[in-house]
Amino acid sequence: MTKLLSEISKNQRVGYILPKTDIPQLSIESIYHKNILAESDRQIPELSEVDVIRHFTELSKKNFGVDLGFYPLGSCTMKYNPKINEETAKFDGFLNIHPLQDESTIQGILELQYKLLKSLSEITGMKWGTLQPFAGAHGEFVGMKLFKAYFNAKGEKRTKLLVPDSAHGTNPASAHIAGFEVVEIKSDENGLVSIDEVKKHVGSDLAGLMLTNPNTLGLFEKNIIEIAKIVHDAGGLLYYDGANFNAILGKVRPGDMNFDVVHLNLHKTFSTPHGGGGPGSGPIMVNEKLIPFLPVPDIVFENNSYMLSYNKPQSIGRVSGFYGNIAVMVRAYTYILTMGQKGLNEVSEKAVLNANYLRVKLSKLIKIAYDTICKHEFVLTGKEIKEKYGVSTLDIAKRMLDYGVHPPTIYFPLIVPEALMIEPTETESKETLDYFVSIIESIIKDINENPEILHNAPNNTPIKRLDEVKAAKEPKLKW
Amino acid sequence: MHPYIPHTSEEVKSMLSDIGVSSIDELFADIPESIKLKRHLNIHDPMSEFEVYKELKSLSEKNKTAVSFLGAGCYDHIIPVAVQHIISRSEFYTSYTPYQAEISQGTLQSIFEFQSLICELTGLDVSNASLYDGHTAASEASVMALNSVKKSDTILISEYLHPFTKQVLKTYFLGLDIFVVEVKGKDGKIDIDDLKSKISENVAGLIVQTPNFLGILEDLSEISKILKENKKVLIVSANPLSLSIFKNSKEWNADIAIGDLQPFGIPQYFGGPSAGYIAAKEDYLRKMPGRIVGQTIDKEGKRGFVLTLQAREQHIKRERATSNICSNQALMALASTVYISIMGKSGLKEIAKRSISASHYFESELTKIKAGKILHDQPYFNEFTFVFNKDAKSVLSELKKQGIFGGILLEPILGEKYKNAVLIATTEKRTKEEIDQYVKIVGGIL
C-alpha cells in the first residue's frame, strides 16, 4: 500500500527553491482588503523532492502500460507509442509558445496543423476539418453541432438521430446533449445494421445516422452505400465514428463511403499515448457541404503564410478554450511522417491479420459472437462458460492480470452477453499473440478444473480484487 | 519490415494459413469493391527517425519564443523538472483509462490525490478526475446548474468572464432552448444592480470569474448572498494559483468551482493540452460529469482505488446521460498533482505572492513614466489591464522587435471600448531586469 501524499507530508519540508528576485516584495495585507483574502491556509502537503519522486515512482510501478506488455483493449487501439513522438513533442519551439502570440511568431505550429489537416483529409477522403476537439467524444459532440448548424441553415427542423445498438456509449450521449432525439437501431442476426430498421425511421424529421465502420463487433458494414443512400435521400446526414479507423487505413475511406462528418482519434489510430485517460485528440473532418459550419478559428494558408481565420459567419463557434490538444497533434504528425503511405497501409493490414489470427485461435476456446472474417477486433462471449461453470467474464479478465497482460474490453458491446472485445493492433508480434492464446488455454483449463482460482483472481497484482460496490455505496472521494 | 510492425514474411504466411486464407487481401474481401481505395494514399514515403527529428525540429524553430508577459488563462510559470520526469514515466503515459483497477493503482491513486488537492484548494466537497480545460468546464458546470434548478433554462455569466469561455458556452448551447445571458460589468466588476434585474425564475445560476478576464479580483460577498436568497447556483471560475491567497469557493459560499490547471506545472504548448478542474458541494455529486475515483478495499482489506459512481456516465446511461465525457486529461492532472506536491503549501503561496509583487511593481513603473494608466482602479492579481497613451499596437510591436511579448491587445477581442488596452501578465518567472527593460522600451517611444 502506498501512503497518500497527505500521509507523508512533514511540516516545513520543501520540494523546490524559487530563484532570487530583486522585485520589491509587497505584503499581501497592505494591498488587499481582507474581504477577499483567504480565511485559512490551504492544507497542501509539504514534501521534499525525494519524497515526491519516490512516491510517484512507486505509484508508477503499480500501473500497466503498453510499454509493459500486451494491451488488447477492444475499440481502444492500444498500439505501441513510438518514442520519437515523445521527443519531437518536447521541442522548446512547441512547448513554450503562447496561444495568443502574434501570427508571425507561430508559423511552425500553424504549418504543422495545416499539414496534419491536409494529411487527414487525404486519409479520410474528406475535404477539410478542425483539430480542436479534445477527445473522440468531444469530436462527436462537435460533429452533432455541425449537423444542427447545417439543418438550421437550410431552415429544417430535424430531430431524430439513429444510433445502432452496438455503438459506443458516447454516440447516443453526444447526440442527446447536442439536442437530438436518439433512436436505437437494432443490429441484425449478422451483427450489422439492418437496412429495414433504418428504413423504418426515414422521414422529414430524420437528422441522420451515426455509424462506426467497422462496427464494435469488428465487422465491416457492407451495406454502407445503400444505408448512406437511404439516409441522404431522406435529407439526413451520416456521421462516422472513427474509433475503429485503424482497421481500414489506406483501404477504404469514410469519404468514399459517403459519410458527411468523420471524427478520428489521434490517440488510437495515430499512435499518441493515452496518458492514463487523456489527453487525446478527436479531429473532425467534413465534406464540402459542412465546411462553412466548422468551428473557429480555421487554419488558412494565404500569401505564403499561415493564419488563424475567424472569418466564418456560419461557424458553430469556438469549441475549446484555445485550439485543442496541440502536443497530441505534434505526435500524430510525427507518426504520419514516420509511417508514410506505405507504413499506414501496412498498419491496417497487420492489425487485421493479427485480429483474424487471434479470432481463429481463440474462437476454439471461447465462443465467438459472430464467426466471420473480422477487421481490427472481434468479440467473444462468455455466456456459456458462465452458465456452465459459474465463471463470469469479469473473472476471466481478472485472471488474465495474473499472466501479465491487460484484459480485453469487457461487457461491451452491450448486445453481446458476457462480452470480451479483443483488439490486438498491428504492433504485436506473433509470439505475443501465441502467448495470449496460451493464457486463454490455461484459463480454460482452470475453469474446468479449479474455477475457484478465477473467482479469487487476481493473485499476483499489487492489490487483490477491489470492492467496487463499497466504493459506490460509501463514496470516499478525497483524503 | 517496419520498426513498429514486427511481422516477418514467414510469420505472415503461417498466420494466413492458420486463418485459412491465402492473402491479406482476402481479409479485406468484406469491403465492397466499389468503395475500396484503388490507389495509394497521396502521402509521402516513410521517413527515418533521424529525418523526422530534423523535420520537426525545423518546424518547431519556425515558432518564436520571447520574454513573455502574455496571460489570459495561459501563463509562463516555472515548471520544476520533477514534473516532466514523472509524467514521462511510460507506466503512466502509455496506460489507458484505469478500467482494470488492480493494475492501475498508480493512475487511480494519483487521481484520488488530485481530487483531494482540488477539494482542498477550492474548499468544496467533491472533485472529479479533471475535464478538458477550464473553458469547457464552464459548460459542464452550467449543465449541472440547469439540472439542479427546476424549470430553469438560463445561465447568467459575468461580462468579465473569459471571452473564450463565453464563446465555448455559446457553442455548447447552440440550437438548444438554453439561454446564456450576460450580466453587465461596472468599473471592472459585476454590476450588482444588473445582476438583480436579471435574476428570474428561469435562471439556474451565475458563472463569475475571479480574478476576472481583466485581472481584477472581485468581492463576491454580495453576489453570493443574492444568489443564495434566490436559490440559484453560484459557479466560480478561478485561476487555481490565486486560491492560496484569496478566498476560495467555500469561503464565497459558491456551489461549483471551475478553472484551468495550466498554471500548475503544465507548459503553455500553444494552449493545450491543459486540464480543467471542477469541484462542487456534496449535493451535486450525482450530477458531476466525467470520471471520479473513490477509495475502497480489496479482498484482504487493503486500501485501494477504483473508478466509481459510474451510473452517472454515458456508457451506462447512453442517451439519458447528461454529459458525454468519457475520459479526463489524466496526464495533465498528474502533472498538476506533482507540481502541487513539489511546490507544497509554502511554495504555492510564495509563487502567488511573487506574481502579485511583480504585477504591482510593473504597473507602478509604467504609471510612473506616464505610459498610460490602469483601466479600472481595482484590486488585481497577477495580471492587469493597462491603457497606453500611445497606439498600443505599435508599443507591442516595438517590444516584440526587442524580444518581448508585451501583452495581449484587447480591442480585437473585446471591442472598441478597449482601445489601446493591453492585458499584461506577470509570473514568478519574470525578473526585475525584464520588467525594467520593458518599461525602458516603452519610455523610449512615448
Image (spheres, coloured by chain):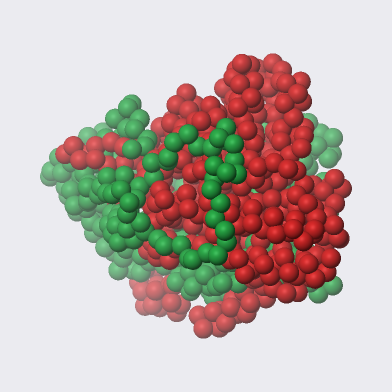
Chain colours: A green, B red
The answer to whether one can see residue A44 in this image is yes
Query: Where is B59 relative to A43, above or below?
Result: below
In the image, is residue B80 above or below residue B421? below
Residue B37 vertical position relative to residue A399 in the rendered view, above or below: below
User: In percent of the image, x 68 and y 28: which residue is there?
Assistant: B155
Q: Residue at x 36, y 59 (%)?
A: A15
Residue B273 is situated, as x and y percent measured from the top left of the image, at 56, 56
Q: In which quarter of the image is the C terminus of chain B?
A: bottom right
Task: Give the image location of residue A42, x and y in percent.
Answer: 42, 41
Q: Quadrant of residue B321?
A: top right
Q: How many labels does the image show?
A: 0
Q: In percent of the image, x 48 and y 28: which residue is there? A: B281
Image quadrant where residue A163 sits: top right
Q: Can residue A418 be seen in this view?
A: no
Of B281 and A464, the residue lying toward us: B281
- Compare residues B301 and A156 and report the one nearer the observer: B301
* A94 with respect to A18 (left or right): right
Q: Residue furthest left?
A: A449
Residue A230: percent from left, percent from top: 71, 41
**Residue A239 or A87: which is nearer the viewer?**
A87
Q: Position of residue B316 (x, y in %)?
A: 46, 33
Left or right side of B170 for B36: left
Question: At 33% from the left edge and 68% from the top edge, which residue is drawn?
Answer: A430
Is A170 situated above or below B66?
Answer: above
* Quarter placement of the N terminus of chain B: bottom left
